[in-house]
Every structure is written in structure tokens, then in C-alpha cells.
């Protein structure tokens, strides 16, 4: 029997069926390695009730803290606008506390992280993310600093198509699309106030063309404004690619498509997951550029593992970065057992 000299501590919540549960349910792939696997929830971590670990080296794999997020950051009774700065500052504070507890509890152990806590909130700040990724040589959509109605109308009159996104959001929530004669948003507007849906799913887009009262309110929020990408269409459909990256490798590519006139390609907001063979329809050189961009993006945020969303441009050459997901949902196991391949990389990385 091979001696277990290291321990992988996976931290997550049972609510996280997309990553945490999928991963620990595949821990059999660690058999025959020098790594023992333990798992724990965040409530236990915050109570400082962590498992005793005999091995000298501990590798920590933090998954998304769903229970904490739903209780303290985005509770059901939250009445503010989704994706504002308080989401980000609370998340940063949470990870500082988690790191402090782990460091103190396992004092004297050699600690390593799949993704270090100090980097886990970075992708929530869309401006920080874009600056970091652009600094690594990855193409990002053009940003606009203008926050006036006159400035927005001038851009639209000049032919620009714009996305207004909440600065600290994710999952395709809190997005507004503007082009001359067509305004769409997945916020709602009632009694002069912007209203956020109380769910991660079903943020359906509605037409609010020329409803300036809503737009005035939106421009006062924590937002970013960027030029819409002119996308490559495959079989008449708009699509993006989710690339799962570990270190220098793209482990899996998942195509997600929607109607050409759709605003986003987020699965959580109604897009369709494509079959694995979908990538065979894409220009090979452009696909290779996308892979390199995804790897650069993960490194730019000082992560080891994550999901990178990119869009191929209509010129069949360029690739545009959309966002990084520090906590990407895993594909269904029957589609692709991402946990199996991630575990292989972890074993190689921590020989």
C-alpha cells in the first residue's frame, strides 16, 4: 500500500452540487496516490472545527461558500441592486477570515492552495479582472468611462453596441444591452427602483427601449460599460466557450450557444450546452488562440484552476475575453468527468 504523505482538504457546502459534491464523489481517483482526501463545510471552518491531519503537507481546495453567501452576502430579503460593491467587500473579508483560521489551526504544516484565498474574490471585480487579463496580452472588450445619458446616446448614435454590466456580478445576472432602437435588460424596474430577481436562474431579458428613467438609475450604480463583441456565428447561432484550465493545460472546452439575437450565452440564463463535437466546427487557429488566452487569463489572476469564458470574433482570427470563473460549475459526469482529469493534474502537481 502506498503511504499517504499529503492531504487534500476540500472545503465546500452540500448546496454545491455543481462542483463540491461532484469532486468529492470522484475521490476514488486518488487511490494509488500519496494524497489522502478529507472534506469539510465552511460552517465548520468558521467554527474552527477542522479535522486533525497527520500529514506534514496540506493542499486546500476551496469551493464556493454557498451557505455563507446566501445568508450574509446575497440573502433572499436583500433589497439593493444586485452586484454592487458590498458584495465584493464582504466576499474579500470572508476569504481573509477563512485563510486566517486555516493558517492558525494548521500552524507548523506546509500549506498549499489550489487557489489561494487572497485571489478568490478577484473575478468578482470586473474592472480589476479586465485590467489584469489585458496586462497579460489577452484581448478584452473596449471599456467606456462615460456615465451620462448624453454620452450613452452619442455612442449609440455613432453605431456602438454596448453592454452595461454590474461591476461585481456573475452568472449573467444584472446585464443590460443597448443598441440604437433596441434596449434589453434582465433587471426589472418598479416604482422608480431597479429590482433584482431573487434567484441565480431565470433572469430573463425584457425590452425597455427608450425607457430613460431606468437607464438614468442604472448609470448611478456600480457598473462597467463595454463595447459588445461582433461574434462568430456557427449554424446561425451565437456562442461562447467555457474553458476549464489547470496550470498550463486546458482540460475541457464546453460550447454554449443561443439564438443570434440573444443577449447572453450563459447556461444559467437559458443558453444551450453544445455537444463535445461542437468544437470541431470552429476555425482551428482561432481555437488555439482561445486556449492560449484562457491559460494566460488564469495566470493573470494568480489562480491555478478556473473556468474562462471567451468568444470567437467574426473575423475568424481574434478571440475576446469575457470573464474568469474562479468557481466554475463542472459539466455533468456523463458528458465529461472533469473531476477525474483535475485529480490527475493535482496528483502530478503534488508528487
Image (cartoon, grey):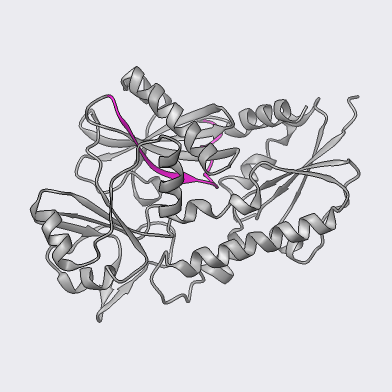
Can you give x and y, in whole percent of width and height, for residue 51 in the image?
84, 53
Q: Quadrant of the N terminus?
A: top right
Q: Verify whether residue 46 appears in magenta.
A: no
Q: Nearer the viewer, residue 116 or 39?
A: 116
- Which residue occupies 36% across, 51% down? 269
Q: In this rendering, is residue 30 above or below 207?
A: above
- Which residue occupies 22% across, 52% down? 162
Q: Nearer the viewer, residue 210 or 188?
A: 210
- Which residue occupies 30% across, 57% down? 204
Q: Quadrant of the C terminus?
A: top right
Q: Nearer the viewer, residue 174 or 257?
A: 174
With 299 as the anchor, is 142 left or right in this view?
Answer: left
Q: Verify whether residue 323 appears in magenta.
A: yes
Among the 4 quarters of the image, the one containing residue 115: top right
Q: Which residues are magenta?
A: 317-334
Can you give x and y, in whole percent of width and height, for residue 187 in the image?
30, 65
Among the 4 quarters of the image, the one containing residue 100: bottom right
Can you give x and y, in whole percent of width and height, for residue 330 in the image?
54, 40
Amino acid at each position: 500500500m502506498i503511504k499517504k504523505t499529503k492531504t487534500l482538504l476540500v472545503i465546500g457546502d452540500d448546496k454545491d452540487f455543481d462542483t463540491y459534491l461532484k469532486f468529492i464523489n470522484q475521490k476514488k481517483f486518488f487511490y494509488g496516490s500519496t494524497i489522502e482526501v478529507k472534506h469539510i463545510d465552511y460552517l465548520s471552518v468558521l467554527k474552527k472545527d477542522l479535522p486533525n491531519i497527520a500529514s506534514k503537507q496540506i493542499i486546500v481546495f476551496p469551493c464556493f461558500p454557498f451557505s455563507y453567501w446566501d445568508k450574509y452576502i446575497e440573502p433572499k430579503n436583500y433589497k439593493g441592486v444586485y452586484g454592487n460593491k458590498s458584495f465584493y467587500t464582504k466576499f474579500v473579508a470572508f476569504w481573509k477570515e477563512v485563510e486566517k483560521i486555516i493558517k492558525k489551526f494548521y500552524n507548523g504544516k506546509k500549506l498549499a492552495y489550489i487557489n489561494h484565498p487572497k485571489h478568490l474574490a478577484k473575478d468578482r471585480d470586473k474592472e480589476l479582472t479586465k485590467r489584469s487579463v489585458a496586462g497579460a496580452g489577452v484581448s478584452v472588450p473596449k471599456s467606456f468611462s462615460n456615465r451620462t445619458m448624453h454620452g450613452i446616446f452619442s455612442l449609440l448614435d455613432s453605431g456602438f453596441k454596448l453592454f452595461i454590466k454590474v461591476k461585481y456580478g456573475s452568472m449573467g445576472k444584472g446585464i443590460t444591452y443597448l443598441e440604437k432602437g433596441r434596449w434589453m435588460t434582465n433587471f426589472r424596474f418598479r416604482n422608480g427602483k431597479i429590482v433584482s430577481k431573487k434567484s441565480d436562474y431565470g433572469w430573463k431579458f425584457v425590452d425597455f427601449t427608450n425607457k430613460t428613467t431606468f437607464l438614468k438609475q442604472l448609470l448611478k450604480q456600480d457598473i462597467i460599460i463595454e463595447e459588445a463583441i461582433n461574434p462568430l456565428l456557427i449554424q446561425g447561432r451565437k456562442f461562447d466557450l467555457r474553458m476549464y484550465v489547470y496550470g498550463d493545460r486546458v482540460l475541457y472546452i464546453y460550447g454554449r450557444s443561443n439564438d443570434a439575437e440573444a443577449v447572453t450565452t450563459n447556461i444559467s440564463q437559458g443558453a444551450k450546452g453544445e455537444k463535445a463535437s461542437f468544437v470541431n466546427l470552429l476555425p482551428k487557429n482561432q481555437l488555439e488562440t482561445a486556449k492560449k488566452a484562457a491559460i494566460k487569463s488564469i495566470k493573470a489572476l494568480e489562480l491555478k484552476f478556473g473556468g474562462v469564458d471567451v468568444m470567437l470574433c467574426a473575423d475568424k482570427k481574434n478571440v475576446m475575453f469575457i470573464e474568469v470563473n474562479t468557481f466554475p460549475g463542472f459539466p455533468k459526469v456523463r458528458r465529461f468527468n472533469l473531476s477525474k482529469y483535475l485529480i490527475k493534474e493535482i496528483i502530478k502537481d503534488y508528487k
